[in-house]
Image (spheres, rainbow, N blue to C red):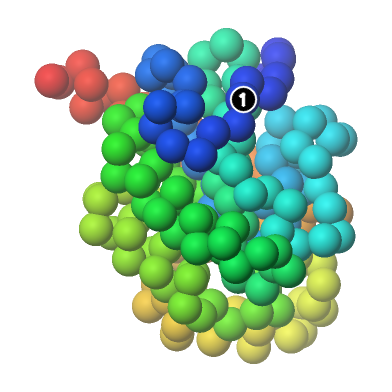
Amino acid sequence: MIIKSASFVKSATRPGNYPESGPLEIAFAGRSNVGKSSLLNVLINRKSLVRTSSTPGRTQLINFFDLNDELYLVDLPGYGFAKVPMSVKKQWGPMIRTYLETRETLCVVVMLFDVRRVPRGEDLQMLDWLEEFNIPTIPVITKIDKVSRNRRKKQIEPILEATGLPEDAFVLFSALSKDGRDEVWERIEIAIESSLTELDDE
């Protein structure tokens, strides 16, 4: 993917606030502080289009970004241990589920897992929703630079066990070295081609 332009479009909490349907959308989901913003910035070759923060839970809305005037990248709210008001936490689940269930232009979700964390409650709930709504998914294990190559397999095994996914389903990614960037794009492009083929067949 050649990145010609990337810009923030808008934030939303419900379908009435979403941008008008048009371009296909690639959404990014994961626990707070899993590295979503860093992954997005690496994918689009920008340092700070998507704000990164050391404070988990800063992404509390659904944020839409325009890419090349032909795709939307959608940053879904991070969930989990973020120190945010309980009232906000309670909104995240319905907000994300509604988007997944209703957004017809959504073609794939990039689902992030931290190499140092075993997936639990909210992660598994997200995977269940993706399966329920039959949404193609690209699982990515982030922050692989945080563990040595010798320990990597041991760190990944609990993630495979918890998710029930095979090892080759995952892309290993590092925002530091940019390892995995090209493979994530390759899988996104395959999902886009598949969605366009389905639309042509309708």
| Residue 114 sits in quarter | bottom right
How many numbered tags mark residues here?
A: 1
Q: Residue at x 24, y 58 (%)?
A: 132
Q: In which quadrant is the C terminus drawn?
A: top left
The answer to whether residue 73 is left or right of residue 175 is: left
The answer to whether residue 104 is left or right of residue 112 is: left
Q: Position of residue 140 (x, y in %)?
A: 57, 59
The answer to whether residue 15 is left or right of residue 44 is: left
Mark 1 lies on a secondary structure that is strand
Q: Position of residue 165 (x, y in %)?
A: 40, 72
Q: In the figure, 143 relative to 40: above or below?
A: below
Q: Decide which of 93, 176 is in the foreground and name it.
A: 93
Q: Residue at x 25, y 50 (%)?
A: 134
Q: Position of residue 16 (x, y in %)?
A: 40, 27
Q: In the figure, 19 relative to 41: above or below?
A: above
| Residue 67 sits in quarter | top right
Q: Position of residue 50 (x, y in %)?
A: 75, 37
Q: Residue at x 46, y 27 (%)?
A: 18
Graded by Cα atoms within 10 Å as few (under 14), some (14 to 19) or many (20 or more), the crowding at tag 1 reads: some
Can residue 141 be seen from the camera position used here? no
Residue ID for mark 1: 10
The residue type indicated by label 1 comes to Lys
Q: Decide which of 25, 200 is in the foreground and name it.
A: 25
Can residue 21 be seen from the camera position used here? yes
Q: In which quadrant is the N terminus drawn?
A: top right
